[in-house]
Amino acid sequence: MKKFLAMILALAMVFVLVACGGAEKPAEQGAAEATDELAGTYKILVWTGEDAVDLTKKQIDDFNANNEFGITFEYEVNPVSEATAADQMLVDIEAGADLYCFAQDQFARLVQAGALAKLGAAAKDFVVTNNDAGVVGAATTGEDVYAYPMTCDNGYFMYYDKSVIPEEDLDSLEKLIEDCENAKKYFAFEANTSAWYLASWFFATGCVSDWTTDDDGNFISVNDTFNSPEGLIAVKGMKKLVDSPMFLSSSSSDEFSNGAAIVVTGTWAFNAIQDILGDNMGATDLPSFEVDGKEYHLGSFNGCKLMGVKPQADAKKGAALHKLAQYLTGEACQMERFEALSWGPANLVDQQSEAVQANPGLAALFLQNQYSKPQGQIHGSWWDIAKVIADDVKAATDDAGLQAALDNYYNKINDLFNMTEEEKNAWSVIGAINGTNWDTDFPMTEVSEGVFESEAMDLHAGEEFKCRQGGSWDVNFGVDGENFKVEADGTYIVRLTLDGDNGTIELVEP
């Protein structure tokens, strides 16, 4: 039986509310921390996920009632998904939220755009001392910290149907594939359509793809070892699964209703899977695979949600906002979010609590975390480049074909750092259009200053797309942070009109 490993003993948390942050990137307000009088009333706009709106209002009320600084916030809390917060923030930073929650993969472009206030020395120490090191890394660029950790639960592990999968087979990928094939049940692992999941195989054999940014969040180099002898071992293991007739490239909880015995996904799917499987639901870490007599435990990415403070022209308001941010991401508030929303805490003390350890989904995630890598800052183009590896692996018929898949990947990674300025600035359309599935860029031409157009395309009602720059997701436009949706069938030119940091998309007839 698998045993849940104890987490690293947490340091005792010293909860100190200190002022920090900056009025303008990258300036700090740290010099004013000890002397500024912050008492007063401040009007603020806050963005958080829809399910956390009411709790966030309650927590701000608690801060207003109990803080020792005489600070009162008159607040508006709006529901904005953490997944799209950066898209909406970068449309108009000045009009954006003063305090906002976002997924860590948006961190680099928020720093680049000057949408995050840098933490002062005392606030940085508060973050580093009290939170999971992986999450701290996700909020850091260079030597500077720009955000506050909120969660440590954006990772994946294995759910399984106990009526199909014997407990003694859980450690072996080969046995799990055999169990699924014998039962004619799917093994759902989103390898063909998501680089986030596909990376598991390479992490298993010790490969890395570590990206380096400068202090402004710009990517300057990468240490990528996927194309290596260890990478070849990884794709040999991957091929065992993708070649199975019961393999399904999906991470949806619904697959258990559609004939799956295994789904690799995360804590967000826990309730839905429990509703489907009931007492037959199992959750544990990923298995190991065997190549040439040696076993390799599948790795994973782990990720998080962060809270950012927008740079403020009023230094006192900025310092007050940082006090609020530290309160909202402190031990007590993180535990409240766990109890109300089942969000996995980043706070070290909370992670060790009996209640958190007893949660089956989080327990499986924390078990898998010993094999995981923090999702640091990754170039926006990498996700498209890496996700095609599994298709190439499935098509390969021998080791030479597998090596060709790695060579293809390696060449595309190198091309990122050899792009011309014209290529970096070029705009394109990408989406589920023209028979493609978010894997093909259709070029756009600048027809007048700040106006870009595609060739005429046959589009259908309900199809979705975005416009992006440089073949990367670092700068992209849709509608209010979401994809642009086609309303009616027709032949259209996609037109993108830029206005400063804003972009407007429209469909025009040729």
Image: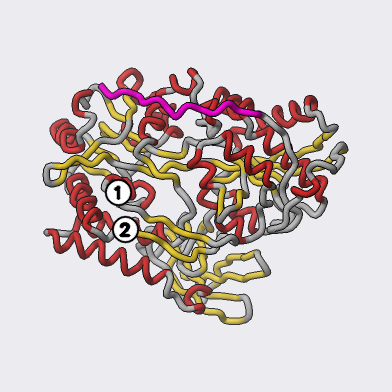
Report whether 163 appears left or right of 65. Answer: left
Q: Which residue lies under the disc numbered 2?
A: 225
The foreground one among 341 and 29 is 29
- Which residue is more in the foreground, 225 or 480? 225
Q: Residue at point 37% right, 39% down?
A: 252
Q: Is residue 310 left or right of residue 107?
A: right
Please tell me whether residue 181 is drawn above or below residue 12 in the rendered image: below
How crowded pointer 2 is (Cα within 10 Å; few <14, some 14-19, many 20+) is rated as some
Is residue 490 visible from the viewing direction of this image?
no
Mark sitting earlier along the chain (1/2) = 1
Relative image position of residue 268 (x, y in whole percent): 46, 34
Q: Height in image: 168 above or below 390?
A: above
Q: Secondary structure at mark 2?
A: loop
Q: Tell me if 196 is positioned left or right of 76 in this view.
A: left
Examine the rendering and report whether any part of residue 33 can be seen. yes
Q: Specify start and end residues of the magenta stretch as a single range.
A: 1-14
User: Which of the numbered marks, if any, corresponds to residue 180?
Assistant: none
Instruction: Give the residue type that dot 2 points to.
Output: Thr
| Label 1, label 2: how far apart the Cα atoms are | 9 Å
Q: Quadrant of residue 400?
A: bottom left
- Dominant SS of magenta comes to loop
- Please identify the quarter of the rendering in which residue 277 is found: top left
Amino acid at pointer 1: Gly
> Do residues under tags 1 and 2 come within 8 Å of each other at their CB atoms?
yes
2 in the magenta segment: yes
Question: As displayed, is residue 306 above or below residue 185?
Answer: below
Q: Nearer the viewer, residue 36 or 399?
A: 36
Q: Is residue 53 magenta?
A: no
Q: Residue at x 78, y 41 (%)?
A: 320
